[in-house]
Image: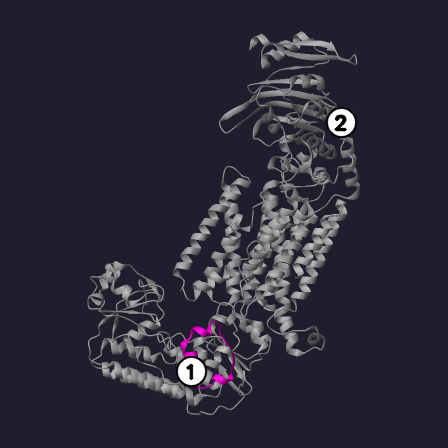
Amino acid sequence: MKKWFSFIMALIFACTATACGNAPEEVREEVSERTEGEEEVSYPVTVTDQLGRQVTIEKEPETIVSGYYISTSLLVALNLQDKLTGIEAKAESRPIYHLSAPDLLTLPSVGTAKEFDLEGCAALHPDLVILPMKLKGVIPALEELELTVLAVNPEDQELFEEAAQILGTAANALPAVNKLLQYTQEKLSALADTLTGLEAPSVYMASNSSLLSTAGPQMYQHSLIENAGGENVAGALSDDYWAEISYEQLLAWDPAYIILAANADYTVESVLEDPNLAACKAVKNRQVYQLPGDIDAWDSPVPGSVLGSMWLASILHPGEYPAEQWKEDVREFYETFYRFTPDTDGLYAGE
Amino acid sequence: MKPFTVLHLIRTGCMQENREGRIKWILASAFAGTTVLFLASLFVGKYPLTLNQLLEKEEQALRVFLTLRLPRTSMALLGGFALGIAGNVYQTVFRNPLAAPDIIGVSSGASAGAAFGILFLSSGTAAVTFSAFLGALTAVLLTLSLAGTGREKGNASIVLSGIAVHALAQTMLMVLKLTADPEKELSSIEYWMMGSLGGITSYRMPVTVLVCLGALTGIFLLRRQVLLLSVEDEESRMLGVDVGKIRLMVLLLATLLVAAVISVTGLISFVGLLAPHTARLLAGKSRSSVMLLGGLMGSILLITADMLARGIAAGELPVSIFTSLLGAPFLLYLMAGKGKAYF
Amino acid sequence: MDSSFFFTADQLNAGYGKRQVLREVSFSLRQGCITGLLGANGSGKSTLLKAICNQLPHTGECLLNGQRLEDLNIRRLAGRVSYIPQRSGITLSVSVLDVVLMGFNPVLGLFRNPVQEQKKRAEEALAAAGLAGMQERDYQTLSEGEKQLCILARTMVEDTELLLLDEPDSALDFHNRYYVLMKLRRLVQEQKKTALVCLHDPGLALDICDQLLLLKEGRCISSLRPDQDAPQVMEEKLKQIYGPLSLIRCHDGQGQSRLVLLSDLSAF
């Protein structure tokens, strides 16, 4: 019996050891080697992706599979949509594809971040596969199939810029990348200049799922509020993700503005009519808005996310940065990078 | 449709008069059915693969075959077999036709472990697999040690501690889900709990195969003891069975089997419950051949379900949908055919 | 102590929790004899069997051919003592042959399976028990009498020195009671076994057993030998357990001398 028990224990330990050996390597905080200034890429080129992997790209990729909407959207902004042969699932839910590159919607899907379709991807024989960091588990198998894989992790503005550099280098589109990043930088610093010295009104940012779930200081939404010259009432929370709060907490914060996420499944009206919030400053002054989501998900680090900050600035400080100016900026951005003219009239919930 | 042809063959086999011969016949046809399905399954999938491509040693086709298709199909074969065998062991040892791996907390432990892995370790699959495996083992060891501390040391106390541990693991899972990001991690957890063989690659196979084969060998060697455990404790003790130790050993082996499978595939519902019943309905008596048949039925069910999961829609679908969808009517069909109490 | 006694129980005390059921029970059994254990419900019959086969903590000792049973581990004990419960706890569909083969467990290694010769012996045991040709039947589909016979066949292959049977007559009809117990009697006599049998029916016990032990409130109050003792003596002893009754010696249809137990109707 003892023998048996130790046999089983040995088995368990053997498995444990092997499983540990298989654990994926830790993410390294390492910025990729950029070749600033040098805009034409000569192949083969080696880039460091956002998992810290050194990946050599033998020739300029002709076909690309992108398994993440932010990288897909970025490739569209870099005018590389024609090289895409497969994209992530649920593409039809992204308005930007309909508006800028409707052909993408006919491409085969390679699955979601939860369930990547390895065979479907292999069947497309892509020169380059771009995956979100979440899918790092499938990378060894794709490499075994001799596919070139880059992992990106565009979770905030800084990481997005890094991802843009990596993809720009890999796909020989550095000029477009620099143009995009430069535009963003200019707009952000112009906005900062406009807003200097103004008082920052308090803002409460509610999530897609519930009014009582808000963005803490670690989230992209927090920097969106800061860029727009506001103060996140939930800035002192320690949660690094959406935090669940109570009505009492919301009333205690008493924000001057309540902003709903773009894809919220509840409406501005429902918040204005919520009897629990009747005493809240934002509701009393009818300062409840929803981030427009008809073109792009500006509350996530997409290429055009700076427009989200600018939209909020036009809500918080209409005197300094009026709505008309914002609409003009939106049109300019999409004409420049996505090659279409958006209909901005229906967008502005602030009117 | 292949499964129904197989099913029909098996039913025809039931009509045979000679009992010994009948069981051999059923076993042989189940074996043949498994083989046919396995081979068919090798050529179903998103990547267009044909036998010719493989024979001509076309490089990419071979690579897809060896890293994706073959491991996945083998996992369906082995996983179904393992779940079928483990289900038989649980049902026999607990003398309860409804006993499934969760009776001693295996699946809820694995779920909690997987959720923990998804949240805190890394979304990388190896970490989640490991964490799920550890969760399952922890839950079962907890159940068995709780049962060992009680005054009544028998099946009832194991089942009761199992319920307690199950509840505990469910609570942990709830807490973990609460802290999860609803758009990313939460959906990963939910998806894990529906099971899928889509992520199986040649990298994830060796450990699972090793553990499964080890545990299967153990259970096969102990198959006579498993049968003896189906007799009441006192009686089997007087037949010379050290009930406490043997039961612990057999349950641990079955748990290893289930944990090794579901930690890579996610929860797969119904196979562990259904396969042994099907085998018993087909072959009648609970003996080692029925155990083997249960394993084969598990393989047949899981291979078929996985073929549908990967072939029916543009994307991958969770495999548990099909194991339940196929399994339930199959069970009803067999029960209608027998029309008597059979357990 | 008389060396012709093969099994001796000495000063057994046992109980469940704080409730003491057996009080200083001592008795001895001979080889080749069936000893019946009689007593009202709750008098401690089943408890005594459980104590002997060491399933219940107890004080005192049981000696089988000089060996203290308390000192044996589960396997060795199973090799020397077999226990047949009122009804076997087999709840699964399992073939009759497999049930009988379970009896080989104490002599088989953990990972071993019965060999061909053992299967043959199991079939012979089934035939001896009157179940010839039934080896492939499903145990669950047997009648209660056949089930007891199947368990008896299993006991035969266990080939232990001491047999303990807990009310084998309880679930059987009139015919099967005699059928099963006569098979047991033949087994005990031919193979020089020692058997201790709890019985419900004193009439049956008087017919079958070589010796009877009377148990009352956990004490062994007396013993009697149906073939030797005078009916009047036995009657007095049985009254202590069953109340007013009369015991009559008479002859059956075949001219054999039998004992008949009649309850005193006026007592009710």
Decide: is C250 above or below C58. above
Magenta segment: A74-99
> Disc 1 sits on a residue from what chain?
A
Q: CA distance from mark 1 to mark 2?
A: 94 Å
Image point (62%, 22%), residue name? C10
- Asked if A282 appears above or below A79 in the picture, the reply is above
Where disc 1 sits, the SS reads: helix
Q: Which residue is mark 1?
A: A100
Can residue B309 be seen here? yes
In this rendering, does residue A35 appear at all? no
Residue A171 coordinates in the image, percent (x, y): 49, 86
Q: Is residue A36 above or below residue A98?
A: below
Which residue in the protein does label 2 denote? C187
A238 vs A184, nearest the viewer: A184
Q: Residue at x 53, y 52 (%)?
A: B106
Across and down, in percent, residue A33 comes to 45, 84
Element type at marker 2?
Answer: helix
Q: Residues within 10 Å of mark 1 (few under 14, many from 20)?
A: many
The chain containing the residue under callout 2 comes to C
Question: Which quarter of the rendered picture does the N terminus of chain C lie within?
Answer: top right
Q: Is residue A97 magenta?
A: yes
Let me know if marks 1 and 2 both belong to one chain. no
- Whole-percent x and y of residue B134? 52, 57
Tag 1: residue type?
Ser
